[in-house]
Structure formats: structure tokens, C-alpha cells
Image (cartoon, grey):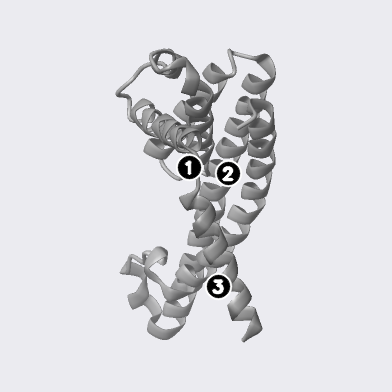
Amino acid sequence: MAEIRSTMDLVMERAARIGKASSEELRQGEARTRGMHLTVDYLDGKSARLLDELEREDAAVQMAIRRGMVESLLRNIFLARDDVQLERVTRASQGLVELAGNARDVASICQELRHIIDGYTRHREQLRHQLEEQVRAQYEQALAQQMGEQAGGLNIDPTLQPKFQEEWSRIEAELDSQYLQALEQYKTTLKQRLRA
């Protein structure tokens, strides 16, 4: 019971602190949120350059806006699974380089991120294809034993088989875990470099 009470006390203390936030803290928080919204527009292609958007804002809140932009861009660096997602990741990395003033180290890190994501995509496709072929061969062999020559004309989609779904979920989770770990290391480096 004491544990619940102490958690409740912590919640109440935090709520009291939020209620006492200064107008400057609120202004900076709103500016950070503004930066995130500007980034969404950038990622959606509604604006061409983040720095142009940042320069249009009040100088007193530009750092907070920039911080929001960096946070939002880093959230949009992920393991892309299709071309639309890959385009978003590419745009996010371009935005990070732009906000860093085209610094070579940031550009290099973003290039490494792209290599990781490209490697993930290739590795994922390769593993999926191998699993499809393996499951197809197993089902064709089982059907041939049961049906004989009649099984020859059947077209089997291995991706619809429960065994495929189960095994693919396991493989994909392991693959994601490996690549996400590398991705997060680079994102942490970027966050430190950009001081977001």
C-alpha cells in the first residue's frame, strides 16, 4: 500500500510542478512542438528546406524549434519495409544533414544509417524468399506423398501456410532486433552531435 501511496505522491508532485511551469518554459515547449509540426510538413514534401522554415521563426525560440525538428527527424529514421517508407527515411536523414549545416560527420553517419537500412531490406527479402522456397518444398513433398501424381498440378502459396507465418514472425523479430540495435546506436550518436 505504501508503494501505491508513494507513486500517487510522485504523480501529484509532478502535476504540481507542471502547474508551476513558467511562461518561458511553456513557450519553449510550444516552440519544440512547432518544430515537430514543421518537420512533418517537410517530410510530407510541403516544404523544401527545414532551415528556411526555422529562419522564419522568432529568434528567441529557434533553438527549441530546432530541437523539436531533430527529435522528429530521428523518430523518422526506422527500418523501412517499402519504397514509401524508404523515401521518408531518406528525407529525414537529409533534414538532419541540413540542420547540421551539412557537417561531414553527420552526413557520414546518415550514410551509414542508409547502408544499415538498405542491408536490412536486402537481408529481409533474402530470408523471406528462402523461407518461402523451404516451406513450398516441404508442402509439395507432403502432398506428393499423399496424392501422388495428382499433386503435380497444384500451385502452393507458401505465405498462406500457418507454418510460414509462424516461422516468418520469429525470423523477422530476430532480424529487426539485430538491425534496430545498430540503428539506435547511430541515432544516439546523431542526437548527441546535434544536441537534441
Image point 60% across, 27% down: which residue?
110
Task: Give the SS element for disc 3.
Answer: helix
Q: Name the residue under label 1.
A: 80
Of marks 2 and 1, the one in the foreground: 1
* 15, above or below 190, in the image: below
Mark 3 or mark 1: whose residue is earlier in sequence: 3
- Disc number for residue 88: none
- Disc number for residue 8: 3
Q: Distance between the residues labelled 3 and 1?
A: 40 Å
Task: Give the SS element for disc 2.
Answer: helix
Q: How far apart are marks 2 and 1 (CA)?
A: 8 Å
Residue type beneath disc 1 = Ala
Q: Name the residue under label 2.
A: 120
Where residue 140 appears, as percent x and y from the top left, is: 44, 71
Image point 52% across, 65% down: which residue?
12
Q: How far apart are marks 2 and 3 (CA)?
A: 44 Å
Residue type beneath disc 3 = Met
Could you tell whether 36 is left or right of 171 in the image?
left
Where residue 34 appears, as percent x and y from the top left, is: 39, 31
Task: Give the SS element for disc 1.
Answer: loop
Asked if labels 1 and 2 touch by Cβ distance under 8 angstroms, the answer is: yes
Where residue 95 appears, as percent x and y from the top left, is: 49, 23
